Image (cartoon, rainbow, N blue to C red):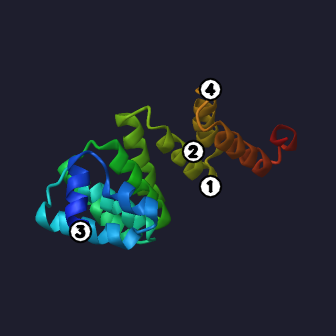
Amino acid sequence: QKTAYEIGVRLVGSEMCIRDRYQADGQLNTASATYKKLIAQSPQHPKAHNNYGVNLQSLGKHVQAKQHFQRQLDLSPENSRTLFNLAISLRVLGSTSEARGALKTAIKLDPNLHAATLELADLERTKGNYADAKKLYTQLIDKNIFRGLSDMGLGLIWLAEKDREKAK
């Protein structure tokens, strides 16, 4: 039987993620151990730091996740998905301004990364920047993307603004 590391290297090499193999089965710690070994052997691996960061997020280890996302960005600074993932950890850690910057950069690099637009809309809403949040939610609604979540975000804004008629 192959070790987790051997399976992980083979899976990554065939464009599958270790995360998909182990995290889908709820084996987060196995995925973590596999990523550690992969990074130790190949610190320049094109996806390992980002995927390990996502694994760490799943374990609630956002400080460590942030470090791996930043390392991945050192290797590929225009990786919009890594910027998005970094923003999630930054937001959880309370670094709202940095999260906002990472999300805006991710969206600029990939306007079709709609999850980043939704995350930025939610961030702006929770910080009371309703005009910005409305604009972002409306962009998603107009594209019929994340429609339910965007409608809910707008509804929460209208409730906060005490516009109960629109909130219905």
Mark 3 or mark 1: whose residue is earlier in sequence = 3
For label 2, the residue is 121
Give residue 126's mark.
1
Looking at the rendered structure, the kind of residue marked 1 is: Thr
- The picture quadrant where one finds residue 140 is top right
Task: Tell which tag, 3 or 1, sits nearer the viewer.
Answer: 3
Mark 4 or mark 1: whose residue is earlier in sequence = 1
Q: CA distance from mark 4 to mark 1?
A: 22 Å
Task: Tell which tag, 4 or 2, sits nearer the viewer.
Answer: 4
Looking at the rendered structure, the kind of residue marked 4 is: Asp
Looking at the rendered structure, the kind of residue marked 2 is: Ala
Q: Position of residue 120 (x, y in %)?
A: 52, 46
Residue 95 appears in the rendering: no
Mark 3 or mark 4: whose residue is earlier in sequence = 3
Helix, strand or loop for disc 3: loop
Q: Is residue 118 left or right of residue 156?
A: left
Q: Is residue 66 left or right of residue 93?
A: left
Q: CA distance from mark 3 to mark 1?
A: 49 Å
Mark 2 or mark 3: whose residue is earlier in sequence = 3
Q: CA distance from mark 4 to mark 2?
A: 14 Å
Q: Position of residue 126 (x, y in %)?
A: 62, 55
Helix, strand or loop for disc 1: helix
Q: Residue at x 48, y 60 (%)?
A: 91
For label 3, the residue is 1
Give residue 142's mark.
4
Dot 3 crowding, Cα within 10 Å, few <14, some 14–19, many 20+:
few
Report the front residue among 12 and 103: 12
